[in-house]
Image (cartoon, rainbow, N blue to C red):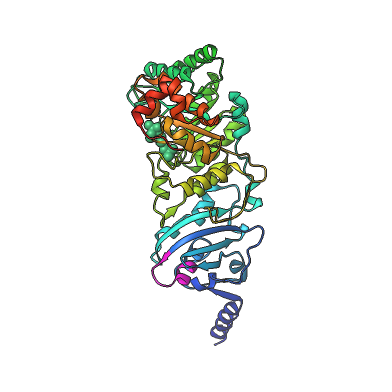
Amino acid sequence: QMCIRDSFYRIWFRNFFLKKMEYMDYVDLKYRPEKDDLICEFYVKPSKSIEEAAGAVASESSTGTWTEVKAPERVKKISAKVFSIKGNYIKIAYPLQLFEPSNVPQILSSVAGNIFGMKEIKALKLLDVSFPKKIVREFKGPLFGIPGVRKLLKVKERPLVGTIIKPKLGLTAREHAKRAYQAWIGGCDLVKDDENLTNQKFNQFKKRVIETLKLKEKAERETGERKAYLPNITAETKEMLRRARFVKENNGTYVMVDIITAGWSSLQTLREENESLSLVLHAHRAGYAALSRNPRHGISMLVIAKIARLIGLDQLHIGTIVGKMDTPKREVVAIDQEIEKSIIRSDKAGHILEQEWFHIKPMFAVCSGGLHPGHVPYLIKRLGKNIVLQFGGGIHGHPLGTESGARAVRQAVNAALEGIPLEEAAKKQKELKLALERWKKIYY
Ligand code: CAP
Ligand code: MG
């Protein structure tokens, strides 16, 4: 009898001090976020009620699970709280204790992990994340950022002009280097590898780096301008570091990496290594649209951009509004501001959450994808001068070839900066004239 009575009291006693934790226990619309909370905004399409779905998201992304589990009060204290539900848009506050502040994969395994697959929701999109100071201070941010890149290239004001060697794949290292040389002579500041060119048999990484850097130095001597080559080091992490070191040993100044396919852990490792390498890190985002393109499901490019800035890439593709990719103006402008400004106030223009960047330097926004000289006035007008304008087909597809294609782009940039209509500028500059005849449309 005694032991039955004891276990009854033990269970009663235990239950008295344990709290039930069901989905609705994670909804507290009176909660006001703490300064140290990480905050997320989601779009949610619920399977049943929005409250239930919101509670499920907060539960699964913090401390809970599908059924009631009793837990000590302290677990409830560190659990996520849904503090705002407006239509299909919810805001969730996550106490700092839930996170390992310097660990990007862990942060994303929480707020961008299991939740996308739950039956409680039909669709879920992580729209924005506001990182508290106690997380931001754990990250170095860009080593160069906009000021460092401008100093390196000795380009004080104007937008930077870059090209991607085309065709994407298939050229030999020597042919690649020659096209790069023509682009630099024509006026490009930057020449990058394409996102899927790494170390193929027909164009091996080391050979390409040596050949292209040699012609980069030749182009610098002949133009009197600083030039840069952005070799694509995307690979398994240790191999990426080996390739980055090889670039440095050969007096390279930049590397590029496909951040989505390489993965967040490898970027944290690369940024750590970059303290000693001091290379400008260019972030290509191939694959991001699988996460961000659906307006109702996935992870926004704004969130991806914020994480890239935190970790410390120096340049980031953000879209073009008018190019070949589906990159809406509201999104591109919001990302451009998010990666450049030091404080973001929440507003209707795509910034949903406040963000202070404290010591984190601004990243250079890169516009690339289906661009030609006719797009230049529009992009400078809307995104300012702190942008890298990149043209693949829009330079190598010029009727007179790569060098003239690069000249046409620089002529368009100069005209746009002086407020001269491109049609006007084209009258005296044949490369620009031929480019406008080829691609027709001019965007102001
Ligand atoms: C552009 C590009 C870029 C994409 C990236 C390409 O070439 O090299 O990788 O634009 O898009 O492979 O398509 P073109 P985003 O100039 O010939 O289009 O910057 O939106 O990630
Ligand atoms: Mg590309």
Residue visible at 45% across and 70% down in the picture: 50
Q: Quadrant of residue 79?
A: bottom right
Q: Position of residue 250 (x, y in %)?
A: 53, 18
- Does 180 sit left or right of 342 as displayed? left
Q: Position of residue 260 (x, y in %)?
A: 44, 42
Nearer the observer, 320 or 275: 320
Task: Examine the structure image and report whether residue 54 is included in the region drawn in magenta.
Answer: yes
- Does 40 sit left or right of 186 as displayed? right
> What segment is highlighted magenta in the picture?
45-55
The residue at the far bottom in this view is 1
- Does 36 sit left or right of 63 as displayed? right
Q: Quadrant of residue 152?
A: top right
Is residue 254 among the parts visible in the rendering?
yes
Q: Position of residue 128 (x, y in %)?
A: 52, 54
Nearer the observer, 181 or 378: 378
Q: Position of residue 127 (x, y in %)?
A: 49, 55
Residue visible at 47% across and 39% down in the picture: 259
Image-quarter location of ligand 1:
top left
Residue visible at 57% across and 43% down in the picture: 339
Is residue 233 among the parts visible in the rendering?
no
Q: Quadrant of residue 46?
A: bottom left
- Tell me: residue 192, above or below residue 338: above
Q: Quadrant of the N terminus?
A: bottom right
Nearer the observer, 109 or 116: 116
Task: Examine the structure image and report whether residue 43 is included in the region drawn in magenta.
Answer: no
Q: Give the number of callouts.
A: 0
